[in-house]
Amino acid sequence: MLLGLLDAVRDESGKDAPIRLVFEPKSSRIDRQDFVNTLLAHTGMEGNSTLNLVSIGIDGRPGQRTLREMLNEWLQFRSHTLRRRTQFRLDKASDRIHILEGRMVVYLDVDEVIQTIREADEPRIALMERFSLSERQAEDILEMRLRQLARLEGFKIEQELSKQRAEQAKLQQLLDSKAAFKRMMIKEIEADAKTYGDERRTVIEEAERAVLEVKVLDEPVTIIVSNKGWLRRRQGHGLDLESLTFKTGDGFQAAIECRSTEDVVALGSDGRAYTVAAASIPSGRGDGQPITAMADINPAAPFRHIVAGSAKQRYLLGVDSGYGFISTLGDMSTRQRAGKQFVTVPDGDRLLQPLALKETDTAIALLSKNGRFMVVDIPELRQMAAGGRGTILMGLDPDDRLSQWAAIGPNGMQVTGVYRRRETTEVLGLAELEVYRAKRARKGKTLNTRVMHPVIERVE
């Protein structure tokens, strides 16, 4: 597809533009946005990169965090660092003020201080008692040389003391005021950004991955399914199926009428659902393509049933052990080639053919292998959008299995079978079915019919 649109590619990177690639379409009639989407979808110009943000948090433990969580923890760390640094500077300023206040006392009476030191056996204690000094102040005076002690200048002490007290008040306000503390953090972060920051090299913005949209004509189509899982698409509904041919050893399984814009869902024997677009199924007079080429179907659980139609189309899904639920085709659909698990199929159970329900349907008919029959109102059935096992539809004996089900509309249902070696159809109206009506999970009654090997169906 890309080669059919692209005429030439030139690398015009240089001094004026570090990176400049020029793509020329083959025709000026090609839409610009469609051309861009084609390039992004079929080349490596657009890709996804996985980012695993694992870091050691402020609690000292490693963990996976979002970008927002990492930024919040960094701000907490920055706040903690600024608070500790401010407190350290405040403690240093307070200690210096304490020392200077002691020196001011000495300056006022240097001679008496010197005499006290000379005459006392314990000069430190004597200074503390005589001049009301703290131990820290007394130690500072004793550590000073006599020459320094004699040259103390009151003006310089007062000047430094004033400076330290102003610093102390400023630091204390920074710790006490949340607004001032926040302004200081912002100021420091802006200064760091100015010193160490550089121009942004990437753009962070919300964007969606480019999707190449293929325009599909909305028309009626019929999906032909073979026994070995080959699919082909024919235009129109009501086709003559007698003229169909298949590969040697293969044969007809089903013909599903739908629209070309709708999805086709295949159900594996393990209850896994796989989705294929009806428009992507090969058309024409050939044998088509195996479904395994369109979806990654588990080889150990080959497909059993295929359905198609509107996303709102309701289906009854279940297994022959008597469990089932209602879901829509849209619920079964998935974008994953490997499909998704949808119907729970325990070991030993068999997935039944999905039963399409119409808006006019009011109940479903259930027939077991041993001939037990019952009618259950549709509102009693559980609807499960996420799939699962469902609830018990019909209570069964250990040696019995649910073999058939059919939707019941305004015209009732029909039973087709063999009577006197001829195929016969009996129609059961709503009044005749009333005797079989029961609550969900009951065992039902023996179906009163004269035909052998009955097959139950909706009366259209």
Image: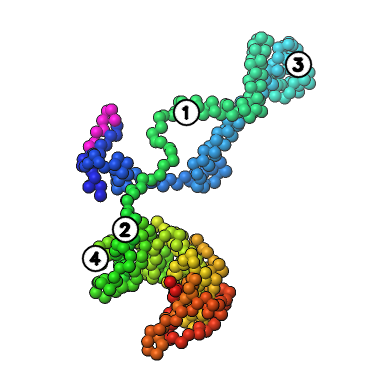
Of circles 4 and 1, the one toward us is 4
Of circles 1 and 2, the one toward us is 2
Tell me where residue 243 appears, x and y as whole percent: 25, 72
Instruction: Label 1: state its secondary structure.
Output: helix
Residue at 44% in and 67% down:
356
138 vs 16, left or right, is right
Residue bounds of the magenta highlight: 10-17
- Which circle's residue, 4 or 2, is located before the other in the chain? 2
Residue at 27% in and 28% down:
15
- CA–CA distance in space, label 4 to label 2: 15 Å
Q: Is 15 a magenta residue?
A: yes
- CA–CA distance in space, label 1 to label 2: 53 Å
Circle 4 is placed at which residue position? 286
Up/down of 420 relative to 70, above or below: below
Circle 3 is placed at which residue position? 116
Asked if the residues shown at circle 3 and circle 4 are in contact, with their CB atoms under 8 angstroms apart, the answer is no
Residue at 39% in and 63% down:
308
- The one nearer the camera, 297 or 88, is 297
Amino acid type, residue under disc 4 in the picture: Gly
Task: Name the residue furthest bottom.
Answer: 420
Circle 1 is placed at which residue position? 193
57 vs 141, left or right, is left
40 vs 152, left or right, is left
* Number of residues whose C-alpha sits closer than 10 Å to that of mark 3, classed few (under 14), some (14–19) or many (20 or more): some
Asked if the residues shown at circle 2 and circle 3 are in contact, with their CB atoms under 8 angstroms apart, the answer is no
Circle 2 is placed at which residue position? 280
- CA–CA distance in space, label 2 to label 3: 106 Å
Instruction: Label 4: state its secondary structure.
Output: loop
Asked if the residues shown at circle 4 and circle 1 are in contact, with their CB atoms under 8 angstroms apart, the answer is no
Question: Does residue 401 appear in this view?
Answer: no
